[in-house]
């Protein structure tokens, strides 16, 4: 750094607290404050790296389509003895519907779901395969005997270049301690899809909701509605911003960062690019093992200091670039 | 009744408050108080009739096997973006397991499940078909467009002479308001089977638990355990007790009661018969539409008075029989 420790760039911070609920108000703000937000590049640090020994930079994040489904059988909770066997149980029906969403190869069965997926090139898949990944360590960390996923793809590909459909929540009937012999009126599920280029979250949401309505049998009622969505986003690895960030990481970590596709979603990216006309650079210092969205979420102090050390170099190299 | 209004029989009341949780302590009490409980007949009023216009008496109740299942995927809740698609989601897997428990004809798929079922005779099925039942009224009452159930059986047969498997509860992941992008560690379900003669609840519980463990895929862990069970019970329609109860109903309702098979379970019946050596008579005055185990459970005052009016005749006719 320069001896004066003075920054060679101007910085604008944008801080908002609604990211985990889909940033419902940010678009309005961004659209009406384009001058205020005018910038040459946008740096987002809400991503992870493989490890401090294997620094990496996300070159893309997945999009999201998050919906909630409500299945109604009888118009009230029933005694499961008096009515059991003679009227559709919404839990059973919802389970059958959910079960049908992945085939025996764990491909998603919704017609048209993969239509807009840009297949990763052989070259990109080869590069991904070279990124450090220990399957045994992955299984051990998660406490599973076997991994699961779409046939024909590696674990890294499954979270990086492929779209997914996950159940985020399910509930219905009696869920307390002990037993209650109820045949419930309703069952619910929260379902979200992660999307990859060039899937469009509005199209996928419609496909998903319409598919669920189509496969719903006539002896139940179904409601399905969007919680929130976001578009997938990719950033080029030859932009001035990416090169500055990669050089900053190389300076402080002593290694070039590996470009990887992140599995999460940052819906504001496509909004920023569209409204402000600049590319996003992802330079995050967390780890996947930080228990994101999980009990005991953490961020190691070592990573925190490494971030403090690295980010000023981004500004230096960007202004020099 | 006699002018003195004095009872012609002695009465012993047994009142216990644990029926809905499987009466875990009653067996011990009954076994150690056989002399105290010695009786000629046992009258249970925890059953329903078709309607005040169509009085009926249960001639059997179904048995019960009630279990809880816990499916564990990863050892902690995960971020559904970072890990989604690469590790088994316990909700998805539990849904697939539940979905597989009924085939396309809604037969239960557990091997051996039906082995001990005594098929109802053509004569009994004919008699059942003659009992007043309005399918359109049934659908309207439950608010469903179509009924559901095992192919080859009527709605009344499905709740009377056939065993069932129902989901009483399911939960896992995020179930609160809004959205959370979690891939949960665990998913749970409460599952109960209603049993008919000569199914044995211990055998069925073992079949059910072992089947779930067998179909559980290797990328999840499963636990399954019994909440409680009870045996199916049938009472003959030519016993002194049944004839006395039927005559009592005929006296106050002006119609012979229709013998029907009840769908619910009263696990103490087989215990009473085994330990005390006497038959159970079911003479209940509720209605299926009383919203049993449901919000706004009720018992009509008219039915209550009809019970007060009828039961003394049972004692009269039983003592005369």
Image: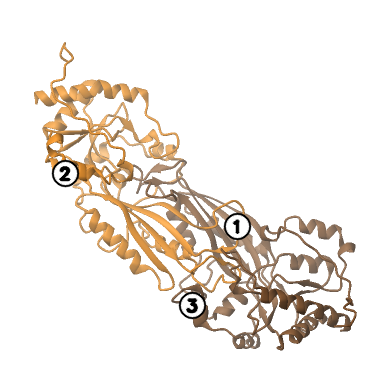
Chain colours: A brown, B orange
Provide residue B87's location: percent of width, then percent of height. 51, 72
Q: Residue at x 43, y 76 (%)?
A: A145
Q: Which residue is at the front of the view, A115 or A251? A: A251
* Labels 2 and 1 share a subunit: no
Residue A140: give its label.
Answer: 3
Specify the label residue B149 is tagged with: none
Of helix, strand and loop, which one carries label 3?
A: helix
The reply, left or right, for residue A300 in relation to residue B103 is right
Vertical position of residue A6 compared to residue B297: above or below: below
Residue A280 shows in this picture? yes
Name the image quarter holding residue B101: bottom left
- Which subunit holds the residue at mark 2? B
Residue B254 visible in the current orientation: no
Decide: is A76 above or below A120.
above
Name the subunit of mark 3: A
Q: Position of residue B57 (x, y in %)?
A: 24, 34
Please identify the residue farthest to the top as the structure is shown. Answer: B3
Sequence-first tag of 3 and 1: 1
Mark 3, other Cα within 10 Å: few <14 / some 14–19 / many ≥20: some
The local secondary structure at tag 1 comes to strand
Residue bearing mark 1: A67
- Real-space CA distance between mark 3 and mark 1, rounded to the nearest whole angstrom: 31 Å
How far is mark 2 from mark 1, CA to CA? 55 Å
- The residue to which callout 2 is attached is B31
Of residues A148 and A47, the one drawn nearer to the viewer in this rendering: A47
Q: Are marks 3 and 2 on the same chain?
A: no
Q: Neighbour class for label 2 at 10 Å: few (<14), some, many (≥20)?
A: some
């Amino acid at each position: 750094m320069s001896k004066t420790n003075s920054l060679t760039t101007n910085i604008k911070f944008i801080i908002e607290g609604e990211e985990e609920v889909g940033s419902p108000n940010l678009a309005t703000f961004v659209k009406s404050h384009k001058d205020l937000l005018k910038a040459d590049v946008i740096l987002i640090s809400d991503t992870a790296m493989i490890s401090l020994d294997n620094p990496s930079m996300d070159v893309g994040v997945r999009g999201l389509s998050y919906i909630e489904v409500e299945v109604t059988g009888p118009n009230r909770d029933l005694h499961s003895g008096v009515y059991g066997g003679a009227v559709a149980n919404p839990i059973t029906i919802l389970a059958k519907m959910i079960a049908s969403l992945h085939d025996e190869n764990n491909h998603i069965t919704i017609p048209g779901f993969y239509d807009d997926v840009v297949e990763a090139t052989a070259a990109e898949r080869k590069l991904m395969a070279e990124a450090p990944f220990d399957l045994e360590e992955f299984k051990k960390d998660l406490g599973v005997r076997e991994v699961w996923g779409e046939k024909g793809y590696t674990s890294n590909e499954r979270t990086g270049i492929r779209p997914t459909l996950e159940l985020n929540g399910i509930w219905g009937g009696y869920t307390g301690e002990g037993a209650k012999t109820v045949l419930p009126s309703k069952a619910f599920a929260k379902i979200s899809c992660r999307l990859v280029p060039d899937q469009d979250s509005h199209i996928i949401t419609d496909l998903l909701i319409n598919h669920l309505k189509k496969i719903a049998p006539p002896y139940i009622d179904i409601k399905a509605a969007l919680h929130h969505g976001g578009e997938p986003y990719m950033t080029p690895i030859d932009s001035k911003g990416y090169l500055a960030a990669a050089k900053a990481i190389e300076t402080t970590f002593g290694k070039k960062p590996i470009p990887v596709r992140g599995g999460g979603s940052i819906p504001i990216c496509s909004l920023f690019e569209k409204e402000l006309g600049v590319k996003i650079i992802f330079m995050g210092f967390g780890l996947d093992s930080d228990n994101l969205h999980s009990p005991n979420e953490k961020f190691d102090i070592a990573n925190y200091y490494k971030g403090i050390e690295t980010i000023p170099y981004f500004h230096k190299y960007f202004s020099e670039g």
